[in-house]
Structure formats: C-alpha cells, structure tokens
Image (cartoon, rainbow, N blue to C red):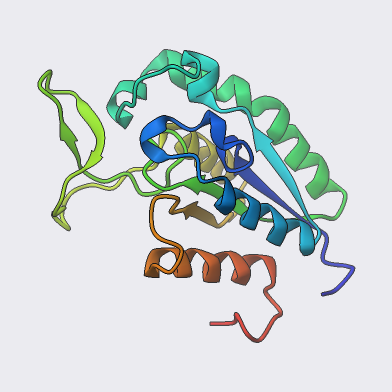
C-alpha cells in the first residue's frame, strides 16, 4: 500500500450505526464490523452523513418505498444533511486525498443504488418489498439520497463509484462476494489480486 494513496470514502450512516436502519433491513452489526475493520486496516478515512430517514421520521418509523420519500420536503432535508459531509469531501480532495467511492445500502429507498420495481400495498403505494421476478425492462432508480449525491458529483464533473452493501444476503452469497470485489478494486486499485 502506497503512503501517497490517501483515501476517503463516503458511507450511509447505518453502515456505521446499524441501529438507524429500518427493521425490515435488519441490523447486522457483524457486517458493519467487517466493513469498518477492512476500511480502517487500509487507512481509509470514513465520512458518513446523518441518516435522512431517522432524522426526518425517527427510529420508530414504518418501512416505506422510494415513492413515499420522493417529495420536495424530503429531498430538501437530504440536501441539508449533505452540506457539511460534502464540504468535508471537498476539503479532503483539495488536500490530496482520493475519494474511493460511496457505499449505500441495498434495498434502501434513500441510500440504495439500484431501486427496482417493488410490491404495492393495499393503498396502492410502494412497499419496501421488491417484486419476486422483476421485468428487465422495469426502470431502476437510485434511492433519493444516492440520487442527490450523484447529481452533486456530476455537477462537479466527478466520476465517483457507487457501491451498495447487500446486508440481507448471506455472507457466502454471490451478491456479497461481488460487493467485496468491487470495494477492494476501488480501495486497492494497484493490487493485482483485484484488478479486472
């Protein structure tokens, strides 16, 4: 590992504090521990932003789909929460650090990267439960916070890798292995073991 490769990474808060996560996504402290241990071992500075769902609706909120969060008020709330963390990212970049990426949470309506079609409830509003067999033609959107981050990076002409941690998949799953490979490729780009 080169000392010159000073790295930071931006993460959703529930990856550091699983208590923020809505109950249907589970808390999975061992996975957070594994992620933080890996990042700390490789001297990656971690910047997290406050959980927009917790700060808007508290810990006792009901699980919801992206549709319910996609409104002017919640988007404004997300933008406010990102102000200081984004300034921190810019300050680190200005001082020679490399932004290795952003890590969101699989199936999160706010911090997920690939929000596909979800089941609807009896009120015809989107639920947090994905459909069993999605149609490949169905649109895939980012979570609200991830989308706002993407827009911010795009406005600054920054190409930042977006990864999503599959917290509900088993440790030995293909999805989890793919996440770890993608993360290691971003954090350790010169390691021949992870080059594609």
Q: Is residue 20 above or below residue 141?
A: above
Question: Residue most toward the bottom?
Answer: 192
Q: Is residue 154 above or below residue 136?
A: above
**Which of the 4 quarters of the picture holds residue 16?**
top right
Could you tell whether 166 is left or right of 161 in the image? left
**Which of the 4 quarters of the picture holds residue 192?**
bottom right
Front residue of 64 and 192: 64
Residue plotted at (85% across, 55% down)? 96
Residue plotted at (17% across, 58% down)? 136
All told, the count of numbered labels is 0
Residue plotted at (45% across, 50% down)? 167
Residue 122 in the image, given as x and y percentages of width and height: 10, 21
Residue plotted at (43% across, 33% down)? 110
Could you tell whether 149 is left or right of 122 in the image? right
Could you tell whether 3 is left or right of 168 in the image? right
Could you tell whether 26 is left or right of 9 in the image? left
Front residue of 102 and 28: 28
Q: Is residue 174 above or below residue 122?
A: below
């Amino acid at each position: 590992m080169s000392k010159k490769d000073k790295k930071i990474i931006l993460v959703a808060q529930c990856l550091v504090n699983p208590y923020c996560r809505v109950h249907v996504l589970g808390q999975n402290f061992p996975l957070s521990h594994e992620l933080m241990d890996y990042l700390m071992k490789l001297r990656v500075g971690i910047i997290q932003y406050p959980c927009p769902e917790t700060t808007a609706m508290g810990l006792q909120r009901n699980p919801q789909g992206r549709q319910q969060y996609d409104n002017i008020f919640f988007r404004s709330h997300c933008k406010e929460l990102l102000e200081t963390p984004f300034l921190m990212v810019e300050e680190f970049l200005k001082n020679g650090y490399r932004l290795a990426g952003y890590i969101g949470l699989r199936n999160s309506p706010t911090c997920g990267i690939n929000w596909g079609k979800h089941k609807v409830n009896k009120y015809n509003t989107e639920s947090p439960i994905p459909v069993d067999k999605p149609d490949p033609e169905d649109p895939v959107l980012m979570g609200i916070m991830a989308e706002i981050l993407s827009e911010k990076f795009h406005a600054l002409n920054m190409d930042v890798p977006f990864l999503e941690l599959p917290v509900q998949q088993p440790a030995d799953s293909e999805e989890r292995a793919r996440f770890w490979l993608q993360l290691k490729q971003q954090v350790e780009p010169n390691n021949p073991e992870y080059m594609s």
